Amino acid sequence: MEQALPELASVPWRQRTDAQWLRRWGRIWHGWTVLYSVPFVIAGVGMLWLEPLAAPVALVAFAHAWIIPELYAFRGASVVRPKGGRNPLAEPVAQGLLADLLRHDERELRRRTGLVLERGRLGVWLVGEAGALLVTRGARRVHCFCVRTTDPELPPSDRVAHLLLALREDEEGFATVANHAFAGAPWRIRRRLPARMRPALDAARAAAR
């Protein structure tokens, strides 16, 4: 049985994150995306129907319908971008310690992409230095979580290792403590990830199917 994370005491007002919570928030984020986009699409179509010469203004409305969800997806993808100091003197040792926690395929994926793939009950995780992506079962949705270690001066690999160990100790607790930043389709998140990290998301989607 998993041991609850001590950090849960700092967020007593939060409902514990489970599969049902993730499904509900996935639907909420989908609803928000529709609410942001559809009015601009309707406005653009209406302007074209009333006055074809208003096409430039209609195109601006269509652009807003596309850009707003993309900005939220960028915010979600940013949780796994490298953050904080690089600490080059301590990083080689930290990389070795992190490698000891991983299997061969996971070590190679981490070396190429900077993200650690971890299979859990809620889905397949990709753990970065200051956040994680969760690809839920069926690979139809990605949840983005922002979470930091208590010591920002740790080298990058140590930060990843701390988050990975917390995830393994209490997966639902980890998702509860973390700040939920975004939920959306994998293709939307993939577009906003650095090119180096995209193979990690592809691997997580394959593992979640």
Image: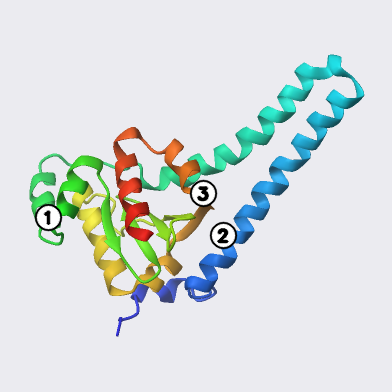
Residue 104 is tagged as: 1
Residue located beneath label 2 in the image: 26
165 to the left or right of 14: left
5 to the left or right of 19: left
Look at the picture and state if 120 lies above or below 141.
below
Secondary structure under the numbered disc 1 in the rendered image: helix
**Residue 157: x %, y % from top left:** 19, 50
Amino acid type at circle 1 is: His
Sequence order check, earlier mark of 2 and 1: 2
Residue located beneath label 3 in the image: 185
Which is more toward the observer, 46 or 40?
A: 46
Find out whether the residues at labels 2 and 1 contact each other: C-beta distance under 8 Å: no
52 to the left or right of 16: right
Sequence order check, earlier mark of 3 and 2: 2
Which is more toward the observer, 10 or 102?
A: 102
The residue at the point 55 percent across, 66 percent down is 23
The residue at the point 29 percent across, 85 percent down is 1
